[in-house]
Amino acid sequence: MFLLISLLTVLNTSVISSGRDIPRWSKESQLGQPLFAISTHHRISLADSTVRLDIVVEVTNDMLLFVRDGDEFIASMELNLSVIRDEVGQVVRKVKHVTKSIPEYELTNSRRDFAVVVFTVEIPPGEYTIKVMLEDKESRRRETVETEVNLTGYFSSDRPLMSDIMLARSSETVLDERIPLHPTVSGVVPDPSSMLYCYFDLLRKDPSEVCRINLLVMDKSGSIKYSDSLSIIGGDRLSSYFMPIRCEDLSFSRYTVTLKAFSGEDTTLRKAGFRINFYGLPWEIGDLDQAIRQLRYIASPEEIKHLTDAFPSRKEQIFIKFWNDNFSCDNEAVNGKMLEYYDRVHFTNMNFGNNRDGWETDRGRVFIIYGEPTEIEKSEMGYDTVQYEIWYYHHLNKRFVFKDEYGFGEYRLTSPTW
């Protein structure tokens, strides 16, 4: 109970209200979460010497600074794309200026509403670094996200070809551009009535032959939870298609969707991942049972058992009810204290993990309960000295001493002040 009171006290002093007027940039940088997300999709080009690559950029509203303009709220950003090849240097540079307009102030802090931008490049096969720099034009903040892509050996000319799967929130396309109108980087489905769509290219040697596409959705254990098929005959040699996934019967979890194309003796297989998150759970939660175990610092063993034993189809609701009953959320659409808690869990996993997950370590436990220390004192490095850290929480009149007594990076709490 004391830990529960402590966490309530600390979380109540944190900046987690949905009424924030500034983006989350500083806080998210400290926690190691990218400020925006990108995904790359290998598409099919009819040109023999190039591959088409679509780069999708997804920025949630609460990463941007909105200003009122009449009856609307507007955010402006500039996105700079650089495609770099090691032996050549920058081979492509593109810039897009994007304006996001929303009608309600509450949506300025939304994590469910996005600005989505797609860059399309045609480049020769090879290995590349993709860099996207975002500048918020109102706050002048900048952030860069990068990823590596390998386009060598991806396509061959002697068999039916299927591009990467691009997940989308609708079956609409941008006119004449072979791009979904509402692509998704995260692949998160937040509404049980939603449909998720698989968008892909298909290149056939002979369009007069029947080509069959099988779709399977499997959970983490490999069990098939949804299936569908599509038969294609005629049409153009290169065409793009949507196949829907009905999400209403899928529970909170991570899933893998597999598309397999059959044409005569030739087959092509592609995979993509997505996540069901019907109730706006934090992005860090990919396994609800693990998230329940991570409540041990604020929940009793009886409460954890009650959540663990809940029927799978109701587990999400009971989990949310636990948070709303124990931590007032002030009518927030998503409980801000829950978001803060799992932000801290994520930070500990990124920074304190060693032989076990960071959230299970002594430093992880203190960080999750009390948040970022006011001050950290560290010992100087030396071969014959025991490394230590002292965490000070001046506003709480507390300090914690951690020592790495065996030199393996396992800092243990040696003099707690609870």
Image (tube, rainbow, N blue to C red):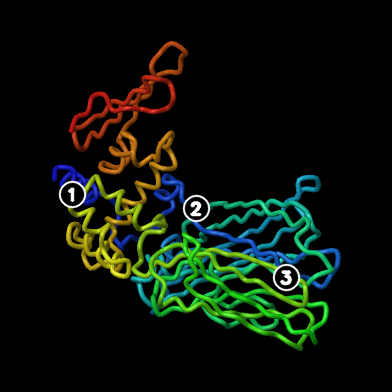
Q: Visible in this render: residue 70?
A: no
**Is 10 placed left or right of 68 in the picture?**
left
Residue lying furthest top in this view? 384
Residue at 31 percent of width and 34 percent of height: 362
Label ID, residue 267? 3
Which comes before the other along the chain, label 3 or label 2? 2
Pointer 1 local density, CA inside 10 Å: few below 14, some 14–19, many at least 20: few
Q: In which image quadrant can residue 282 be found?
A: bottom left
Which comes before the other along the chain, label 1 or label 3? 3
Q: CA distance from mark 3 to mark 2?
A: 36 Å
Of residue 305 and residue 65, the one placed in the foreground of this image is 305
Q: CA distance from mark 1 to mark 3?
A: 52 Å
The amino acid type found where label 1 is placed reads: Ser
Label ID, residue 27? none
For the C terminus, the image quarter is top left
Residue 165 in picture, x, y percent from top left: 62, 69
Residue 62 in picture, x, y percent from top left: 41, 62
Q: Visible in this render: residue 152?
A: yes
Q: Kindly report which numbered mark, 1 or 3, lies closer to the viewer in this rendering.
A: 3
Task: Name the residue tied to disc 2.
Answer: 34
Residue 274 in picture, x, y percent from top left: 50, 65
Label ID, residue 300? 1
Which comes before the other along the chain, label 2 or label 1? 2
- The secondary structure type at the circle numbered 3 is strand
For the N terminus, the image quarter is top left
The amino acid type found where label 2 is placed reads: Pro
